[in-house]
Amino acid sequence: MNETPRVQALALAARIPAIYGTREYPEVGGLMSYGPNLPDLYRRAAEFVDKILRGAKPADIPVEQPTKFDFIINLTTAKAGGGGGGARPEPTPFQTACNEEAVATGA
């Protein structure tokens, strides 16, 4: 994340819509992010550790995929033209079914 400000500045200057994989990017000025909810992943990892400490064999614990995702839009960046211009599309049913959250930050 050392190059985060530079990547965001270049994307905004070129009016390129950029989507990131973690929520930290829109929180510091990026346009949007879509990815797994990290606190939920950490909580689930703790459950795995608990099972192992209680005697479960790691090979017997099934591998799981993330089930909670965050779709975050920085409204300040979107209004400033960080979305590549043009009209914004209506949300799809998939987008509205996800854990949506609008993060309005001062970019």
Image (tube, helix red, strand yellow):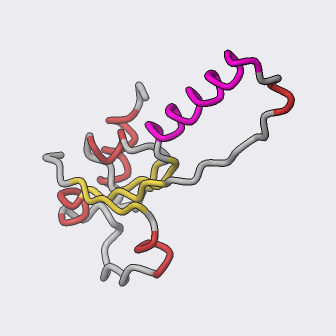
State the residue in front, 96 or 49: 49
Question: Does residue 6 belong to the magenta stretch?
Answer: no
Q: Is residue 52 magenta?
A: yes
Q: Going 44% across and 37% down the picture, which residue do you hit? A: 39
Residue visible at 68% across and 25% down in the picture: 51
| Nearer to the camera, 28 or 55 | 55
Q: Quadrant of residue 85?
A: bottom left
Q: Nearer the viewer, residue 107 or 64?
A: 64
Magenta-drawn segment: 38-55
| Image location of residue 97, percent across then percent down | 45, 72
Left or right of 37? Residue 65 is right
The total number of labels drawn is 0
Image coordinates of residue 68 in percent, x first then y, are: 51, 53
**Residue 107, image x, y percentages:** 18, 46
Residue closest to the eye, 35 or 59: 59
Identify the image quadrant of the N terminus.
Answer: top left
Q: Quadrant of residue 16?
A: bottom left
Q: Which residue, as the protein is rendered here, is positioned at the far front?
A: 54
- In the image, residue 57 above or below residue 24: above
Please tell me whether residue 54 is drawn above or below residue 81 in the rendered image.
above
The x, y position of residue 70, in whole percent, is: 43, 54
Q: Residue at x 47, y 81 (%)?
A: 93
Relative height, residue 39 to residue 18 (above, below)? above
